[in-house]
Amino acid sequence: MFDYFLWFITILLELVLLGRCLRGDYFKRYPIFYSYISFVFLQSIVRFTVYHLKPDWYWSVYWFTEFVAIIAGCSVVFEFCRLGLKGYPGVAKMARAGLIGAFLFTFSKVLLTAGEGADGWTPALTFLLERDIRFVQIAATAILTAIVLVYRIPMSRNLKGIILGYGFYLGTVVTNLTFLGALGERIRSAASRIQASSYLVTLLIWIVALWSYELVANQALGEPRSYSAICEETREQLARSKSTVESILP
């Protein structure tokens, strides 16, 4: 009964989030994020339908859609990079290159493992891929957050909510997968409920954060500093430091 409640309420909250997107015309502002939510909503509907009409097909459908969801989740991290570092093209370019390299390396490693096995692609490999990709996503989100703090990049409440919600969900998923890999079937039911509950909390965070659109906060009545402005300021500070050292030295 509790599992059905979680299933139903998450579908309802996804529908609320998408409905608010249409009403506020937010899709053009966060296209990748809302495309991901649309996919997850359709995935939930398909799984729910198959579970009741064709239960024998459920696990095949589940693992296939889970594989696609792993790839779709990577795009959300790129949305963070695109929006959070919009005014800092140099940093954004390095971040994108790092993300692409990390994701390709992880996919290649799992594909190589699949090629070496006799059974080809199996649910166990999807499990392994999800665990490794989620680790990369967590690391990327943490690095992006660090960049935002170091460069004092202003962010809207909307983007903060997206990052907070997704970061919370990733943390729960990775913890679940780690314990599930160690303990196996003994905790499968509990792990499934914990993950579903965490996704419900994530949806609530997103709904609150994205209920209304907020412009990026300006800095001191002006626009956020550009990447070139930060570089110029850094050069000026280094020049002043050099002059100070030269004046002190004999």
Image: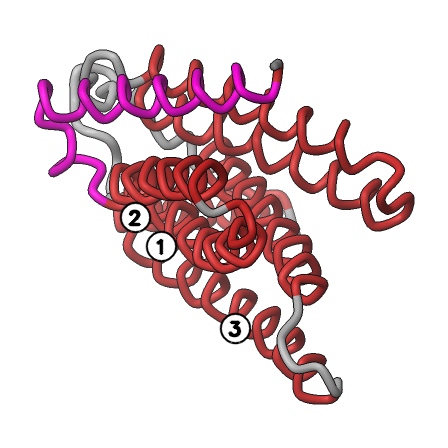
Magenta stretch: residue 41 in it? no
Name which residue type carries label 1. Answer: Ala
- Answer with mark 1 or mark 3, whichever residue precedes in sequence: 1
SS of the residue under disc 3: helix
* Residue 130 located left or right of residue 215: right
Name which residue type carries label 3. Answer: Leu
Q: How crowded is the residue under tag 1: few (<14 C-alpha within 10 Å), some, or many (20+)?
A: many
Q: CA distance from mark 1 to mark 3?
A: 18 Å
Q: In the picture, residue 189 is in which quadrant?
A: top right
Magenta stretch: residue 5 in it? yes
The percent position of residue 99, horizontal first and vertical second, equals 48, 61
The percent position of residue 83, horizontal first and vertical second, equals 28, 41
Look at the picture and state if 60 lies above or below 51.
Answer: below
- Answer with mark 1 or mark 2, whichever residue precedes in sequence: 2
Q: In the picture, residue 89 is in which quadrant?
A: bottom left
SS of the residue under disc 2: helix
Viewer-proximal residue, 19 or 193? 193
Q: What segment is highlighted magenta in the picture? A: 3-31
The residue pinned by badge 2 equals 82
The residue pinned by badge 1 equals 92
The residue pinned by badge 3 equals 104
The percent position of residue 47, horizontal first and vertical second, equals 44, 42
Would you say the residues marked 1 and 2 are in contact, meaning their CB atoms lie under 8 Å apart? yes
Mark toward the viewer: 1 or 2: 2
Q: Residue at x 34, y 25 (%)?
A: 14
Q: How crowded is the residue under tag 2: few (<14 C-alpha within 10 Å), some, or many (20+)?
A: some
- Residue 233: tell me if it is visible: no
SS of the residue under disc 1: helix
Q: CA distance from mark 1 to mark 2?
A: 7 Å
